[in-house]
Image (tube, coloured by chain):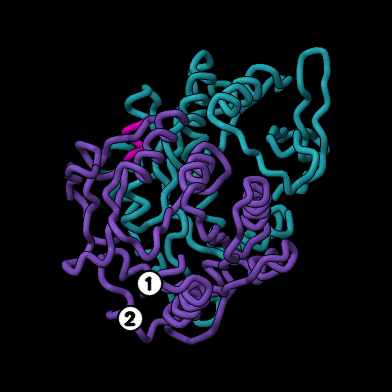
Chain colours: A purple, B cyan
């Protein structure tokens, strides 16, 4: 997605140097993918090994001064999630951004994520509904492929903010497939206003320098 | 999806009795969901506890005589996957059915699943491409929301069978949302022939009594 496949992580005096996505070094990235010899290699690791690496990604990477640190986790409430919460606790993280798709089966899973956040004392910044409706580019009619409204209902039920719905958008997928800059390349796409609005809500809560 | 929420698992002399989905008892089911007190409860379990339960689900459930045992795993190559492979090895499982969505990011992940299967000696029955194109119910035009063809290319590249593509289908989602029988209720839906064809290919490989 960020055109950094095959890049390597180097070591400096203060730890691992993350991979910089752009020349201005405005986005830096760390992933287990950079540590594998071959891209097809399966990371067959049990919990303790994953936990140790997550800790290292927080403490042993020369992140420098960051405005925001975003950790993208898999679904669930297991080793990875506990390790991330434990590793970030000393830095008072802003909270969890919880993403669901609209249908009941996903909302059910994500409800358990919210219980997890409560249990570990992690604030929920808000809920986002992804894959929320599809506007046909041929006829402009909207179809709710995965049902609709589950995210908003979940947020209301759990008493946490609902930040918005992101529609299914072939232009967003294309931009990710081709590693293009979505903001520059697709400002007219239906997902664009949805994503900007969600980002703005989060920025309002956590202006740079306060996060 | 199967209208069994809230059902309980009972104990008999030969172990846990699975939950029966239909009156004919043609489908029986076991899930950690049946063991929770509240449906919102987060299963905050680390690897070893998950592994132990997976083993129990194979050995301590009174499954009786089964034609097929289907294990639905999360994505990844971690504790759950190793535990399932270890627990089923004595029963010579038929293999893994590997599901991907069409876009490069998913195919990349699933390529690592195939490496995992090879590493642990699990045969790959085949690859299925899910969310493969969407035919607008209003204008009948097809849009490849998540790109297209990644699953087939992956299968060719890995030298394993490609079993077929399942389109995005709001009727399939609706059937799952409402817990309705898709085969009975939506035989005209676009996902129906795709799913039947994939199922038939698997049945041909493993007729009842030989699996």
A155 lies above or below A49: below
Residue B60: x and y in percent read 69, 18
Q: Where does label 1 land, which residue? A: A172
What's the residue at 37%, 86% (across, down)? A188
Give the percent coordinates (x, y) of residue B73.
Answer: 53, 37
Which numbered tag is attached to residue B95? none
- Please say whether residue B197 is visible from this viewpoint: no
Task: Please state which of residues B173 and B24 is positioned toward the viewer in this rendering.
Answer: B173
- In the rendered structure, the answer to whether residue A29 lies left or right of residue B5 reads left
Observer able to see residue A173: yes
Point 37% across, 72% down: residue: A172
Direction from residue A132 to residue B174 in the image, left or right = right
Residue placed under numbered mark 2 in the picture:
A186
- Residue A79 lies, with reference to residue A7, above or below; the image says above
Q: Which residues are magenta?
A: B112-116
Instruction: Count neighbours of disc 2 (C-alpha within 10 A) and say few if under 14, some if 14 to 19, many if 20 or more.
Output: some
Q: Quadrant of residue B190?
A: bottom right
Give yes or no for contact between labels 1 and 2 (Cβ–Cβ under 8 Å).
Answer: yes
């Amino acid at each position: 997605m960020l055109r950094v496949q095959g890049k390597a992580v180097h070591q400096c005096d203060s730890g691992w140097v993350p991979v910089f996505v752009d020349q201005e070094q405005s986005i830096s990235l760390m992933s287990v993918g950079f540590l594998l010899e071959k891209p097809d290699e399966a990371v067959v690791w049990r919990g303790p090994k994953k936990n140790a690496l997550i800790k290292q990604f927080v403490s042993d990477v020369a992140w420098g001064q960051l405005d925001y640190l975003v950790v993208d986790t898999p679904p669930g409430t297991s080793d990875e999630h506990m390790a991330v919460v434990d590793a970030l606790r000393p830095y008072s993280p802003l909270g969890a951004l919880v993403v669901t798709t609209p249908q009941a089966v996903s909302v059910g899973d994500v409800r358990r994520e919210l219980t997890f956040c409560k249990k570990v004392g992690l604030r929920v910044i808000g809920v986002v509904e992804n894959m929320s409706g599809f506007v046909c580019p041929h006829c402009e009619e909207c179809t709710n492929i995965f049902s609709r409204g589950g995210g908003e209902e979940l947020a209301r039920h759990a008493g946490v903010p609902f930040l918005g719905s992101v529609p299914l958008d072939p232009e967003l997928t294309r931009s990710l497939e081709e590693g293009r800059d979505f903001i520059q390349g697709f400002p007219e796409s239906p997902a664009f206003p949805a994503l900007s609005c969600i980002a703005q809500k989060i920025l309002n809560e956590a202006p740079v320098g306060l996060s």
